[in-house]
Image (tube, helix red, strand yellow):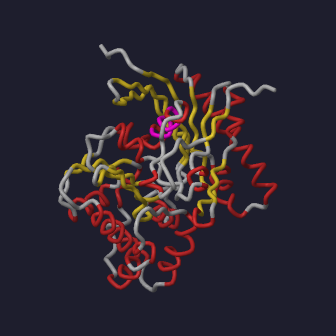
Amino acid sequence: MRPRSEYKIKAIGLMSGTSLDGLDLVAAEFWKNNGKWDFNIAAAETENYEKNWTEQLKMAPALPGQQLIKLHVEYGRYLGQKTKAFIHKTRFKPELIASHGHTIFHQPENGFTFQLGSSFEIAAINGITTVADFRSGDVALGGQGAPLVPVGDKLLFSAFDYCLNLGGFANISFDENNCRKAFDICPVNIVFNYFASKNGLLFDCNGNLGRIGNIDFILLEKLNSLDFYKKEPPKSLGREWVESEFLPVLEKYDCSEPDKIRTVYEHVSQQISKIAGNNGKLLITGGGAWNTFLIELIAAKSNIQITIPSPEIVDFKEALVFAFLGTLRIQKAINCFASVTGAKHDHSAGVVFPAKISA
């Protein structure tokens, strides 16, 4: 029997990543005993985007203002409807919805970040308090607005020395001198999916495309020499960087497509192993955890105990953590570490959209 909790809440987390795989929904219960947080996932699923939504999200950064605002509302309505259907299907009774939204712009160096999906729509459709816009406040405080998951890593997954997420980008978090450190390492699925789509695939299953070619060491050096890798943390990556800095190196370089793909795999595994190559325990989550070739390369370059957890944690950890960040926000507790983002101070991030809007 579970001990009586100091605090307990049921929450739903929504996450849409840069790789455009779909919308992740997690229904979870969080509780706190003796100052320590724990959780249970009641249900989780991915709602794959229909082609029209994939195209709209992909083209959103190029839309004029009025059309972007319209899409912001429409996508918020979509999130609200999918959440309502998920609640009905699972019979879960959440007290809170936490929505990350879909990142359209992330330019902290220019003082802004924008995640699509009006949370007024989510709250209005479901009649449930909704927390969203987790990144803007941090950027206003001089931070990168990312990564945010390290709070969940520290409070929910403290058994591991390193937590590595392999999504559109690889990001890692760990404790150093009793201070949480975290940052984006390099692009992962956002580039692998780029090559997969050129081959008529949604993604590179098991890294099969990566196994075909050979490493081009001149290209590898060009990728490893990109300015981002010379920066000190905190630092974060966005789609804009990939499109303006990373992909042009690949497109301008003259070698076969299979060799380019294999070289990117080598680049990614090198960058990750440089950060997480020491002794300890490494938790790997995100879609890239199922890429057996990438995991083989990381393991070969590292002296660390790698754990790939249950499919629920691998595929839905980010959505789970955003449900947790929303939980902390409702409590007005710290859910964003300045040591991670570079903000002026720790703070409670996110905007609360009430269940009922009244005068």
Q: Give the prevailing secondary structure in the magenta stretch.
A: helix
Quadrant of the drawing holding the C terminus: top right
Quadrant of the drawing holding the N terminus: top left
Q: Please say if 62 is above or below 23.
A: below
Query: Horizontally, is 119 left or right of 243 in the view?
Result: right
Which stretch appears magenta? 321-327
Q: Please say if 17 is above or below 356.
A: below
Q: Position of residue 163 (x, y in %)?
A: 33, 49
Residue 120 is drawn in which quadrant? top right
Front in this rendered view, residue 115 or 205: 115
Residue 257 is drawn in which quadrant? bottom left
* Residue at left offset 55%, top offset 31%: 330
Front in this rendered view, residue 238 or 256: 238
Query: Horizontally, is 82 left or right of 345 in the view?
Result: right
Q: Position of residue 13 (x, y in %)?
A: 52, 36
Q: Position of residue 212 (x, y in %)?
A: 33, 70
Count up the numbered dots: 0
Q: Please say if 89 is above or below 269.
A: above
* Residue at left offset 32%, top offset 16%: 3
Residue 61 is drawn in which quadrant? bottom right
Q: Is 25 one of the magenta-colored residues?
A: no
Query: Horizontally, is 243 left or right of 186 in the view?
Result: right
Front in this rendered view, residue 83 or 271: 271
Q: Position of residue 36 (x, y in %)?
A: 34, 30
